[in-house]
Image: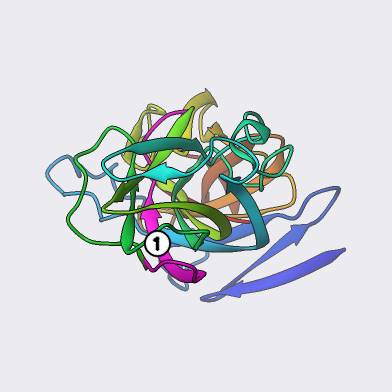
Amino acid sequence: MKRSYRIGVAAVTAVAAGALCFVSVSQAAPNTPHGPTLPAVPNISSLPPAVQEATFVALQPCRFVDTRLAGGKLTAGHSRAFYVRGTTGFTTQGGTSGGCGVPAAASSVTISITSTQSSGIGGLIAYPTGTPRPNSTSLSYFASANMTASTVVKLAAGAGHVLTVADYVGSTHFVIDVVGYYAAQIEGMIAPNATIYSGGARLVSAVRNGVGNFTVTTDTDVTYCTPTVTAYSGYVYASAYGFNGTKVQVFLWYLSAGTQTAYDGYFYLDVTC
């Protein structure tokens, strides 16, 4: 499949051979037969990085906690920690075998929590494991009534039990279903020497293979995702190609007298899945 993109007065053709090729340019080239005068690599060390945002991913509702099947009632003044990410440990907390599809990159989850067989008036508080218990209540419950509430809860960093539920006043069984998660964007800026200048932890590393040729490693399989790369410098083109597994190949170049010339410069990489 062949696609042509018109950038300023220059037309760039991207050929998809096994993987799409995404091309961008930070500034339109001037109308000259000899091409632009390439600027020096900018010094951006004094510029603060942008604040990274999280992306919501909806899930089919999936139960990862059921105290009726494992653990028993939670009583006043006590708390219990649970697995949320990954694929193991869920049957020991009454959850779905194999987990609910929440990846390691998830920073928080949207959950539905339901109390049942409560002994009296009380409440449950969900919060990240290892952090101080907040004063806010995730769910208030009453005797002999099933109560349900939805909330967004931040997860503790790392693996293992990352979400804790505390009870106060009464005692109750409860179930928790996850309906979606938030994960940081796979994005950042790579410097000419292949160091990660800015961005989140989802960009794991970068390697300079040669002039203008880089390999960026992410924390997840991006084979069927959409990487977009943009050069920071004016008159510099950039493309992402050959992305498979956790790696994205990036090439930077500029045109000089109609000839494509490799170039080492800063570039932005963003991957949408």
User: 176 or 122, which lies in front?
Assistant: 122
Tell me if I can see residue 80 in this picture.
yes
Q: Secondary structure at mark 1?
A: strand
Where in the figure is residue 203, as x and y percent of width and height?
Answer: 46, 37
User: 111 or 123, which lies in front?
Assistant: 123
User: 117 or 115, which lies in front?
Assistant: 117
Residue type, numbered disc 1: Val
Question: Which residue is under mark 1?
Answer: 152
Which quadrant of the structure image shows residue 30? bottom left
The colour mode here is: rainbow
- Tell me the magenta residue range: 141-159
Where in the figure is residue 229, as x and y percent of width and height?
Answer: 52, 53
11 relative to 83, above or below: below
- The magenta stretch spans residue 62: no
Left or right, residue 118 beside residue 157? right
Where in the figure is residue 208, as x and y percent of width and height?
Answer: 50, 25
Where in the figure is residue 104, as x and y percent of width and height?
Answer: 53, 37
Name the quarter where the N terminus is drawn.
bottom right
Question: In the orientation shown, which residue stands out farthest toward the left?
Answer: 46
Q: Residue at x 59, y 36 (%)?
A: 93
Left or right, residue 271 beside residue 62? left
Q: Residue at x 30, y 45 (%)?
A: 76
Tell me if I can see residue 35 in this picture.
no
- The magenta stretch spans residue 157: yes
